[in-house]
Amino acid sequence: MFYSIIIPLYNRPDEVEELLESLSKQTDKQFEVIIVEDGSTRKSDTVVENYRHKLDLCYFEKPNSGPGLARNAGAERAKHDYLIFFDSDCIIPPDYIETVSHSLRQKYADAYGGPDAALPTFSTTQKAINYSMTSFFTTGGIRGGKKSMEKFTPRSFNLGVSKEAFNTIGGYGTMRFGEDIDFSLRLQKNGFRTMLIPGAFVYHKRRTTFRQFFKQVHNSGIARINLHLSHPGSLKIVHWLPALFVVGMTLSLVLSLHHPAFLLIPLCYSLLLFIDSLLKNRSAGVALYSIAAAWIQLTGYGTGFLSAVWKRLILGKGEFNAFEKKFYD
């Protein structure tokens, strides 16, 4: 099976060099790579040119539209019948394509997703955010290839889909946040089979600060309500948990002013995160940062979710997002 790997890119020449280097080391070479320069001011044309002798490459520029529509533009130029989408801040293990081909031969799916992991060389912040995004204790889990509280839906940082399925649903929609969930939900609604391939993981660098991480997850919380209105029935109990976390932890802190024992609730949760991350990462520093990352993730998502509940479900306002310029972060 041959694949068309599509990578939307915005001002990330350093990232794409690492990504292309990892793709050049694949044990299975049956793929092309399509780089979509989405209105960047810092272009990657020179970097891409350095890999033309190692990879089957297509590089083109377009006006900025966000990652979803950039992926559509890349899919229009794809030569092969199965598409794979990566984010530019991913590094691909050498047996990735081989693993995907083996899994699809054993049990074909119209679309698949894979988990993300952290390399030992990642920074403390990157490892902490990776922990937060993959831990069961933050409602993650599925991104780490393990059991989750949410039904699996492939995410675009590591997603494969047949061109037939992609074209049938019209590719990615116009949403700037939550576009990958919208894409997967439309696949499922149209009867296409999706699956998780646990071995098809990528190393997701997430070159971000905690401040940027908050903005990202805050928009994800808002997007969940936008998705609910576009896809009735997609909102599950698990999606309310970060909002309940915000309300519950705020209440416990307020009550602790009169009854200090209520401080045990956030303290015990933080201790649980520390121990779990310490066991996984074998680093006290990463474990401490993991506490911060988890609190940022849950409060960011929860506050975004609650603001969207108020504005969209109660006040009946139209679709909105915060931090609109950060849709590539």
Image (cartoon, rainbow, N blue to C red):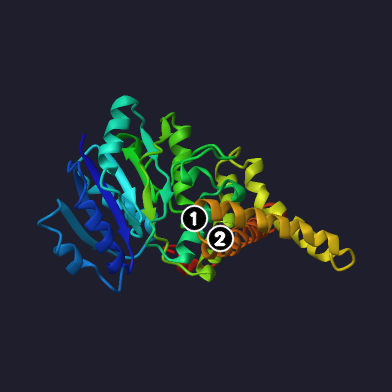
In the structure shown, which secondary structural element does the residue marked by tag 1 occupy?
Answer: helix
Disc number for residue 195: none
Q: Which residue in the rendered view is the most extreme toward the right? A: 258
Q: Residue at x 46, y 51 (%)?
A: 179
Characterize the local packing of mark 1: few (<14), some (14-19) or many (20 or more) Cα atoms within 10 angstroms. some
**Residue that mark 1 sits on:** 281
Residue 35, can we see it? no
**Residue that mark 2 sits on:** 287
CA–CA distance between discs 2 and 1? 7 Å
Using residue 18 as the reference point, say whether residue 87 is left or right of it: right
Q: Residue at x 68, y 52 (%)?
A: 313
Query: x and y percent of residue 256 in the render?
Result: 84, 64
Which is more toward the observer, 250 or 166? Answer: 250
Query: x and y percent of residue 36 in the render?
Result: 27, 58
Which is more toward the observer, 146 or 39? Answer: 146
Using residue 146 as the reference point, say whether residue 99 is left or right of it: left
Vertical side of 101 occupied by 5: above or below: below
Vertical side of 324 occupied by 81: above or below: above
Q: Amino acid at mark 1?
A: Asn
Q: Residue at x 64, y 61 (%)?
A: 299
Q: Quadrant of the N terminus?
A: top left
Q: Amino acid at mark 2?
A: Ala
Q: Residue at x 72, y 54 (%)?
A: 314
Vertical side of 280 occupied by 289: above or below: below
Are the residues tagged 2 and 1 within 8 Å (C-beta)? yes
In the structure shown, which secondary structural element does the residue marked by tag 2 occupy?
Answer: helix
Q: Which residue in the rendered view is the most extreme toward the top? A: 106
Q: Quadrant of the C terminus?
A: bottom left
